[in-house]
Image (cartoon, rainbow, N blue to C red):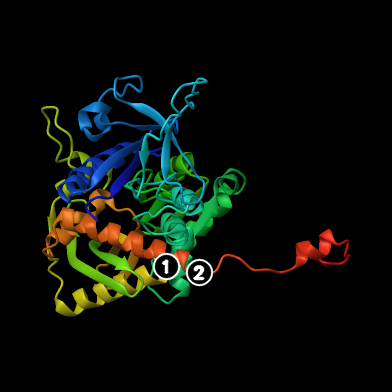
Amino acid sequence: MSKLNIAVFFGSRSCEHDVSIISAMQLIEAAKAAGFFVTPVYISREGLWYTGDALCEIETFRNFNPMAQGITRVTLDVSAGSGDLWAWPPQRAGLFAKVPAPVAHIDCAIPVLHGLHGEDGTLQGLFEMANLPYASSGVLGSSVGMDKIAMKLLLRGAGYPVLDFVWMTRDQLKTQKEELIARIEKEIKYPAFVKPAALGSSIGVSRASNREELERALEVAASYDRRILVEVGIVHPVEINCAALGYGEDVRTSVCEMPVSASGDNFLNFFEKYLRSADTKGGESRGMKSLSRVMPAPIGEELTERIQTMTRDIFKLLDCRGTVRIDFILDQNDVLFVNEPNTIPGSMAFYLWKACGVSFPELVEKMVEDALRAHADKNSSVFAYDSTILKKVAAGAKGAKR
């Protein structure tokens, strides 16, 4: 497996673009340590794809220059089974010139993207069409995991405890604002958390303790997404996170962690997650691993086992693979709720696996192994069925389709 060429996809048209770069730099380092060949594939904020060794270094992104030496714009050949990256625009060969070769061949892709256009099933769908192995959850788990509204409805329907919530669209907020606020004040009450439906890293998330704050929070969330979630705000929440790793029935869970806010506020915002521990002398934040946390979480053996079991079962329910972190909340009465799954967690949740004795390079090896297993599993299915419909149509038969 160490001879495989792993393409690490990161960046993209997402509010979490910069966080994705940090996570990708960490994973690229681990993949190289595991003995893989690594091809970085950076997706710019404009949606253009680039590759080149310079994209393995964080310094390249301080002032990204797509015209810099060693950086090539590329596109993926989406023909099923190709796995080739080609320079873009295509290089035309002269009459006697050598036919150009692909820039790189991908044996397995690892998407390290957070948020829209990468974590939400869109890139996974492209990989499925290209029949390319990839080390993340599939289209179903990725799309449901990204959309907080669909995710909560699905988990509630499956019998898992989730906080009470209401949801709305941006258009509804424009035309029914007073009615929606009245409903929130009746059903959710204050404090309430207002969230864009399909964003992570706490971007666009606000806590509202009164009507003025609620109106402002709704406007902020609506600026990031057309679907908005408003849920009950726990007064003194305790966050507990646990990760799952594997594919199919082969799933293991990590230790549980308790993230800790330095500000004393239980709400971990973007600053707390990514910027507080950054080097003030110009260094970069090292991602989620820089967040203060207690591992294992001091919650007792029984609750730990319950969370690990729920993590494993939700992983299977969403047909996930790779590494997925599921976040839970304990309220002031120690009642447990599922907060959300993160199908491509910050820093790939490697710190949770490290606490289990699994190094980051070993984690990457396992993710690639599961990706290849899932790919072989998919290709073992039947994709053709001879219905004879076309033969009948070609022969002039009528009523072949009713």
Position of the N terminus, as image quadrant, is bottom left
Which circle marks residue 124 in the picture? none
Which circle marks residue 377 in the picture? 1
Give the labeled residue for mark 2: 381
User: Which amino acid lies under the numbered mark 1 shown in the image of this protein?
Assistant: Asp
Q: Nearer the viewer, residue 326 or 233?
A: 326
Residue at the front extreme?
Answer: 96
Q: Is residue 234 visible?
A: no
Residue 326 versus residue 289 in the image, above or below: below
Q: Determine the secondary structure under disc 2.
A: loop
Location of residue 227 in the rendering, given as x and y in whole percent from the top left corner: 51, 50
Residue 271 versus residue 294 in the image, above or below: above
Left or right: residue 167 compared with residue 103: right
Q: Nearer the viewer, residue 36 or 244?
A: 36
Mark 1, other Cα within 10 Å: few <14 / some 14–19 / many ≥20: few
Residue 9 sits in quarter: top left
Residue 272 sits in quarter: top left
Q: Determine the secondary structure under disc 1.
A: helix
Q: Nearer the viewer, residue 72 or 177?
A: 72
Location of residue 88 in the rendering, given as x and y in whole percent from the top left corner: 46, 28
Q: Nearer the viewer, residue 162 or 183?
A: 162
Residue 86 versus residue 262 in the image, above or below: above
Residue at figure coordinates x 48%, y 26% from the top left = 89
- For the residues labelled 2 and 1, say whether their Cβ atoms are less than 8 Å apart: yes
Number of marks drawn: 2
Position of the C terminus, as image quadrant, is bottom right
- The alpha-carbon separation of the residues under discs 2 and 1 comes to 7 Å
Location of residue 268 in the rendering, given as x and y in whole percent from the top left corner: 25, 50
Residue 346 versus residue 61 in the image, above or below: below
Left or right: residue 376 compared with residue 268: right
User: Which amino acid lies under the numbered mark 2 shown in the image of this protein?
Assistant: Ser
Residue at figure coordinates x 30%, y 47% from the top left = 6
